[in-house]
């Protein structure tokens, strides 16, 4: 299994993406109802966007998801 040595910025981007993914899953889980938020909190999206930009991956989703899959194959 290949291993990837991530830069600090790449690791931050992957971690922000995983937090965003967990937030989306938590937002969408459960029965629909008026108490459940309809959108993902803007702060979660902003964190992921900022981390991707800092890693030089903004607008390059193919490279990011290749990196993510190498680092975390279950994704």
Image: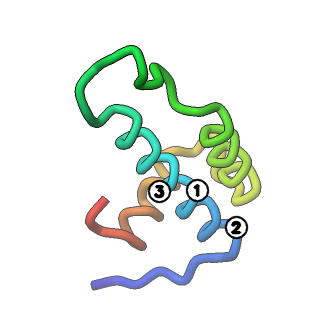
Residue receiving disc 1: 16
Percent coordinates x, y for residue 12 in the rendering: 64, 65
- In the picture of the structure, the residue carrying the numbered disc 3 is 18
Q: Which residue is under mark 2?
A: 9
Residue at figure coordinates x 61%, y 42% from the top left: 44
- Mark 1 secondary-structure assignment: helix
Could you give the CA–CA distance between mark 3 and mark 2, rounded to whole angstroms?
A: 14 Å
Q: Nearer the viewer, residue 56 or 8?
A: 8
Residue drawn where x is 30% and y is 68% of the image = 73
Q: Does the CB distance between marks 1 and 3 fall below 8 Å?
A: yes
| Pick the front one: 17 or 1 | 17
Q: Quadrant of the C terminus?
A: bottom left
**Residue 48 picture location, percent across and down:** 62, 47
Separation of residues labelled 2 and 1 (CA atoms): 10 Å
- For the residues carrying marks 2 and 1, which lies nearer the camera in this image? 1
Relative horizontal placement of residue 5, taking residue 28 as reference (left or right) = right
Image label count:
3
Q: Dot 1: within a 10 Å radius of its alpha carbon, few (fewer than 14), some, or many (20 or more) residues?
A: many
Q: Position of residue 13 (x, y in %)?
A: 61, 59
Q: What kind of element bears circle 2?
A: helix
Image quadrant holding the N terminus, namely: bottom left
Q: Residues within 10 Å of mark 2 (few under 14, many from 20)?
A: some
Packing grade of label 3 (10 A; few <14, some 14-19, many >=20) is some
Residue at point 67%, 43% (across, down) = 49
Quarter of the rendering containing residue 55: bottom right
Question: Horizontal placement of 38 versus 14: left or right?
Answer: left
């Amino acid at each position: 299994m290949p291993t990837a040595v991530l830069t600090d910025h790449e690791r931050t981007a992957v971690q922000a993406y995983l937090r965003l993914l967990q937030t989306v899953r938590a937002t969408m889980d459960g029965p629909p109802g008026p108490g459940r938020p309809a959108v993902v909190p803007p702060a979660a999206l902003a964190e992921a966007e900022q981390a991707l930009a800092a890693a030089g991956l903004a607008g390059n989703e193919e490279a990011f998801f290749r990196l993510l899959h190498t680092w975390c194959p279950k994704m």
